[in-house]
Image (tube, rainbow, N blue to C red):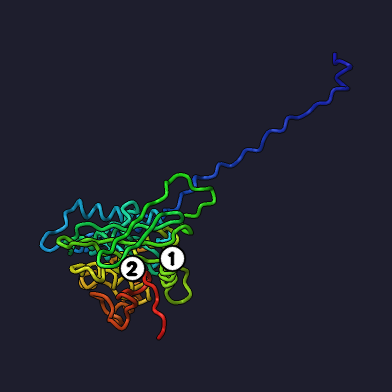
């Protein structure tokens, strides 16, 4: 017999979940190479040219040397990814210039750097790179450069026995609001060649340093070179050193590199003779999402100007034979 309580019971029906139709596995679209793969391909395609430029005289560059240079180029872009968005042919050209000059792009070496100016990559030398270039063609006993900061003890003696006396303050006790760039009051460089009885020196005061930084803006209202923003003391030391490079006998290679560097900072499309003779950038194919390089426009610009094998003419030089972004401008007569 049915139980009377059954009438009061509510029967509930369990809803069965609707069965989902199993979708077929979606095939992933093949992805093209990313920007880093393309950079590696560009470097590999130009290894033979870089090897020729790395060679010195009759001594050819070894394969490990070429591979090490390629890794330095890749690391330089890794440390500054904005270079991937710049004109690719100008980046490969800057690598070629670093190879022919023989300076390292490793930031720890403090020899050279890459920066973007008006969409193009420009190769530049740092203080330590200029020291290396001066040592190559000159019998130099020693080279030294430093910056003078607030509270340093600094004296400059002239006369028949010029010399510099500099004592730095004890480091490690700067206040929290200490600005290392603002504390730079001057920079100086001292060079002594073998056989010379006395060393020669140059001093650049802060107003000279700031003028040189302003000159690095170039044309078109660009901001100052990123090298000044990132390494102000290093670039300050380079200013007096480049003055000495213009008067030290045998520093021809340093003067040549500075001449090309200054011409490029003024917006001129020039490069070294050896680079223009053997280098024609070979870029890898690019997918649609990677900014293509304007190689034809760059080549036309370079052909219209021609290669530069040395400093500009005397009419284009500034005070003490200086030029371009690291010099102080001369006042109009």
Q: Can you identify the residue that label 1 sits on?
A: 206
Q: Position of residue 165 (x, y in %)?
A: 33, 57
Question: At numbered mark 1, what does the secondary structure look like: helix, strand or loop?
Answer: helix
Quarter of the rendering containing residue 225? bottom left
User: The C terminus lies in which quarter of the figure?
Assistant: bottom left
Quarter of the rendering containing residue 293? bottom left
Disc on res. 299: none
- Quote the CA–CA distance across marks 1 and 2: 37 Å
Q: Can you identify the residue that label 2 sits on?
A: 89
Which residue appears farthest toward the bottom when viewing the image?
Answer: 333
Q: Position of residue 214 (x, y in %)?
A: 44, 71
Q: Relative to 172, say whether 320 is above or below.
A: below
Q: Is residue 135 left or right of residue 286?
A: left
User: The N terminus lies in which quarter of the figure?
Assistant: top right
Q: Relative to 298, say whether 201 is above or below.
A: above
Residue 283 visible to the viewer: no
Q: In the depicted view, which residue is nearer to us: 250 or 272?
A: 250
Which one is closest to the eye, mark 1 or mark 2? 1
Quarter of the rendering containing residue 53? bottom left
Residue 30 visible to the viewer: yes
Q: Is residue 202 left or right of residue 15?
A: left
């Amino acid at each position: 017999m049915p139980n009377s309580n059954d009438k009061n019971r509510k029967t509930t029906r369990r809803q069965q979940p609707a069965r989902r139709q199993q979708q077929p596995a979606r095939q992933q679209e093949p992805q093209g190479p990313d920007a880093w793969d393309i950079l590696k391909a560009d470097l590999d395609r130009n290894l033979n040219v870089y090897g020729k430029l790395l060679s010195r005289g009759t001594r050819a560059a070894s394969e490990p040397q070429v591979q090490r240079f390629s890794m330095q180029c890749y690391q330089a872009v890794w440390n500054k990814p904005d270079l991937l968005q710049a004109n690719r042919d100008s980046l490969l050209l800057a690598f070629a210039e670093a190879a022919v000059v023989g300076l390292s792009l490793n930031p720890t070496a403090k020899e050279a750097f890459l920066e973007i100016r008006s969409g193009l990559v420009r190769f530049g030398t740092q203080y330590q790179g200029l020291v290396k270039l001066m040592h190559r063609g000159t019998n130099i006993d020693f080279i030294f450069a430093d910056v003078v900061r607030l509270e340093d003890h600094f004296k400059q003696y002239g006369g028949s026995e010029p010399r510099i006396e500099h004592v730095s303050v004890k480091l490690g006790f700067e206040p929290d609001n200490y600005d290392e760039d603002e504390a730079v009051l001057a920079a100086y460089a001292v060079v002594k060649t073998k056989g010379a009885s006395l060393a020669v020196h140059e001093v650049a005061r802060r107003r000279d340093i700031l003028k040189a930084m302003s000159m690095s803006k170039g044309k078109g209202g660009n901001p100052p070179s990123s090298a000044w923003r990132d390494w102000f003391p290093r670039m300050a030391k380079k200013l007096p050193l480049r003055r000495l490079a213009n008067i030290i006998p045998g520093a021809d290679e340093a003067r040549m590199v500075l001449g090309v560097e200054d011409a490029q900072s003024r917006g001129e499309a020039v490069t070294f003779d050896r680079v223009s003779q053997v280098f024609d950038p070979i870029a890898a194919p690019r997918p649609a999402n990677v900014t293509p390089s304007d190689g034809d426009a760059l080549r036309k610009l370079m052909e219209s100007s021609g290669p530069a094998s040395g400093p500009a003419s005397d009419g284009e030089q500034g005070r003490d034979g200086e030029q371009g972004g690291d010099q102080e401008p001369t006042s109009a007569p």
